[in-house]
Amino acid sequence: MTSLVQRYLGDDGQPAGPELVLGRAHFRPAETHEVLTLEQAAALLQVDAADVAALAVAGELPGRRIGGAWRFARAALLEWLAAR
């Protein structure tokens, strides 16, 4: 056995000590924003940002233009998508 494995396992292949800890993993869910930019909305819908912009300009996709930039409510996009 290699020295790393020997440190954790005995010759019989069982844990050498009362506890076997080989590492730690921390998982944090991706942050979800309630208000999305054009690019974030496109990523959520898994389409090109130009397609999202075209739908928003046509009034087919729920969104608001604020200071020249599009903003979308995450809940409204998911509701819109579910209704299709």
Image: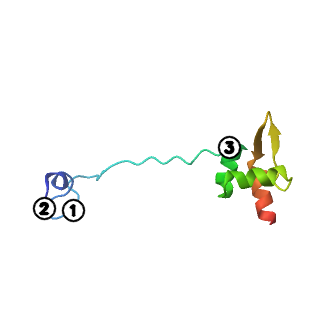
Query: Real-space Cα distance between discs 2 and 3?
Result: 52 Å
Do tag 1 and tag 3 residues touch (Cβ < 8 Å)? no
Q: Alpha-carbon neighbours of circle 2 within 10 Å: few (<14), some, or many (≥20)?
A: few
Q: Which residue is mark 1?
A: 14
Q: Quadrant of residue 71?
A: top right
Which numbered disc, 2 or 3, marks the residue closer to the eye?
3
Q: Mark 3 highlights which residue?
A: 33
Colouring: rainbow
What is the three-letter code of the residue carrying label 1? Gln
Q: Dot 2 corresponds to which residue?
A: 11
Q: Report the residue at 66% width, 46% height from top.
A: 39
Position of 23 with respect to 8 (left or right) is right
Marks 1 and 3, how far apart at CA: 46 Å
- In this image, 81 relative to 3: left or right? right
Q: Amino acid at mark 3?
A: His
Element on which disc 1 rests: loop
Helix or strand or loop: what does disc 3 sit on?
A: loop
Asked if residue 14 is positioned above or below residue 75 in the image, the reply reads: below
Quarter of the figure that contains the N terminus: bottom left
Q: Residue 66 versus residue 31: which sits nearer the camera?
A: 66
Image coords of residue 8 (percent x, y): 21, 53
Label pair 2/3, CB-CB below 8 angstroms: no
Question: Which residue is located at x 15 percent, y 65 percent?
Answer: 12
Label 2 sits on a secondary structure element that is: loop
Q: Position of residue 81 (x, y in %)?
A: 76, 61
Question: Which mark lies nearer to you, 1 or 3?
Answer: 3
